[in-house]
Amino acid sequence: MLRVRCVAALALLLLGLLPGSAPAQMLNARRLGMGGVVTSDNGDHSSSNIAFRAVPKGTMGSSAIPIPLGLIQYAADHPTFDSSDSTFNIFDALNVLTNPPLTIQIVKPKDVSGDISVYIAQDSLQIDLADVKRVIPDGSMAQGGVYHLGGFGAGIRNLFVQVGPIVHVKNEFTLSDRLRDALKDAVPFTGDTRYGVSDDARAQAAIAFQAGLALRAFHLPGENEKENPDPRRNGATAIYLGAAPKYLLGLAYGDAQSEAGITTGDTLFASSNPVTFDMVAQTRHATIGGDGGVGHGFGSDVGAVLYHQNVEVGVGLNDFLSQISWKTTVRRHVYDNATNEFTTTEVATDEHYVSRIPVTATINVAKRMGETTIAADAVAGELRTTLHAGAEFWLGMWALRAGTYRDANKIWQGTAGAGIRLGKLGIDMAIATHSRNIERERGAELSASLSIY
């Protein structure tokens, strides 16, 4: 039982230290081969810029269907999730949970392993975590993002409606300086010292009911527009605009701010209770069918894209000014070390609270020169800004791609890919490096997808 509790406690600590991987795996191999860059015709469509809805698909526009090759690799070789198994490695298990095995892992980071050393004396405690020190960050770790989980919709000409769920989560986990030094640098624990952690977490879910309009607002024909109606490649000057207000039906909201720690005594291990524990947390929540009921709010997606002499410049704002009003219940939870019990106090009931869904801004540029496309973008969200750049070159039915991107851990990665197109169908493959693992070290994966042109 003690082993299970220790494993669970370590898992919770490591989950707080996981890298912020909101974007997660990119399963569109065409786009991944170009460094993950956004354009109006490489499968992104309206997910980054709602104005893309109004742009003609063109001869090179495509959508992607992922091919989950990684499941074959996982079936042949996967970690155990049984903590009593001698081969159990909690880091391998957590990496599977945070990175579903949908791509083939070509290069895996070095396993986190090695013996943990503990040196104990009456007034001395030093812990050497060996390889585990690699996963402890230098500062606080923030993770989360805004997730639009599918849905359905319909459109007539420039008008469209759609309904879909939206989830926003954020968690910021911080070790105190003294605890970080003790765990990361094996600095000995000392007496009369507090070693603490703090956590700020929030999550909310809603259903978005959206109606929008996307249209061409300005048009100056290009020289060969009659032969090629695609504004990306016919030299035309055109501006496309899109706007879609949304009503947000809030399903659930919750947040928690907590601090916890241990304070050592005058002399380590001088008594049966060498440390004292403390913990205080304040929570706020509302949920459909429970305390506070549903929430109500509004938001919008807006975007614009300009084409001029085969140059594309787009700006998209998703969840612009989105917020939800709730009637929340607020509680305070305090741990009493003397009685070894938690006490909960209800601070407020049906307290009005407005939560916000953070905006995601995407700016992209692309230049098309015959069969070659060069593109770059910047995507700014609540926790991070990612950068992507890449190129695509077509030679008949064959495509070659290459790119680079700065990931959520601020590490520059490289990508390369190729594809073949047979009429309206294509097969694309891409190899990309990444640090999307608990070790925050570089790995490499192979992704594959079908393209529909």
Image (spheres, helix red, strand yellow):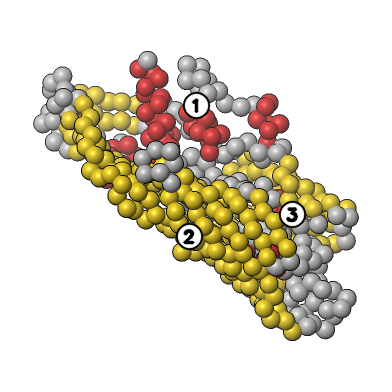
Q: Earlier in the sequence, mark 1 or mark 3?
A: 3
Q: CA distance from mark 1 to mark 3?
A: 38 Å
Amino acid tagged 2:
Phe
Amino acid tagged 1:
Asn
Q: Mark 2, mark 1: which one is toward the viewer?
A: 2
Q: Which residue is mark 2?
A: 298
Q: CA distance from mark 2 to mark 1?
A: 45 Å
Q: Is residue 108 left or right of residue 354?
A: right
Vertical comparison of 422 with 53: above or below: above
Q: Quadrant of residue 302?
A: bottom right
Which secondary structure, mark 3? Answer: strand
Q: How many marks?
A: 3
- Which percent across, then down, holds residue 294? 43, 46
Q: Residue at left 30%, top 30%? A: 127
Q: Which residue is mark 3?
A: 63
Q: Is residue 12 left or right of residue 307?
A: left
Q: Is residue 440 left or right of residue 210?
A: left
Question: CB atoms at circles 1 and 3 under 8 Å apart?
Answer: no
Q: Residue at left 49%, top 61%? A: 299
Q: Is residue 376 left or right of residue 290?
A: right
Amino acid tagged 3:
Ser
Which secondary structure, mark 2? Answer: strand
